[in-house]
Image (cartoon, helix red, strand yellow):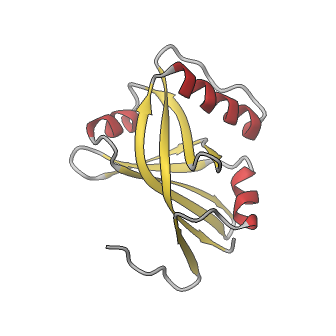
Amino acid sequence: MTRPAARGHRAAAMQPPSPRAAAFLAEPHLCTLTTLRPDSSPHVTAVRFTWDPAAGLARVLTVASSRKARNIAWRPDGRIAVCQVAGFRWITLEGAATASDDPARIAEGVRHYLWRYQSVPPAPPDRVVIEIAVDRILSLNL
């Protein structure tokens, strides 16, 4: 069941973000990623992420041993959220998540990371890419 958005908030299911929201998603802000632990309590951590509008994917590069990657492995295709905030502007991307060590998928994550953050991401040996198939976007002032 989906609840209506709170007053002043915009919820869009399966629709691309507005031009203002798309521009905000291209800005290199730090974000939070929320996953659920095995006991269903939230795990929130600061991350850098990328948005791929053509694929409808948000991506986070991390390591397989991280709590966030283990939470996703424990709950395959479970829902997670990434939220970017700057002042009174914010946007949350929600959807089903997977974590992959496939070199092609990691390379795609690296390519988007380089474009957004203008720097090379860390490359630890057990790197994985978290992919969020975004199906819900919430935002304020965008």
The vertical placement of 2 against 39, above or below, is: below
* Position in image of residue 137 (x %, y %): 54, 64
The vertical placement of 102 against 139, above or below, is: above
Q: Which residue lies most toward the top here?
A: 125
Q: How many numbered dots are placed on residues in this image?
A: 0
* Position in image of residue 142 (x %, y %): 69, 71
Q: Name the image quarter holding residue 120.
A: top right
Q: Which residue lies most toward the left here?
A: 39
Q: Is residue 136 left or right of residue 107?
A: left
Residue at 74% in and 40% down: 116
Q: Is residue 112 left or right of residue 67?
A: right
In depth, the one of 70 and 58 nearer the eye is 58
* Position in image of residue 79 (x %, y %): 37, 52
In depth, the one of 32 and 134 nearer the eye is 134
Quadrant that contains the N terminus: bottom left
The vertical placement of 71 against 23, above or below, is: above
* Position in image of residue 73 (x %, y %): 31, 34
Q: Name the image quarter holding residue 121.
A: top right
Residue at 67% in and 70% down: 88
Residue at 63% in and 62% down: 16
Residue at 71% in and 59% down: 22
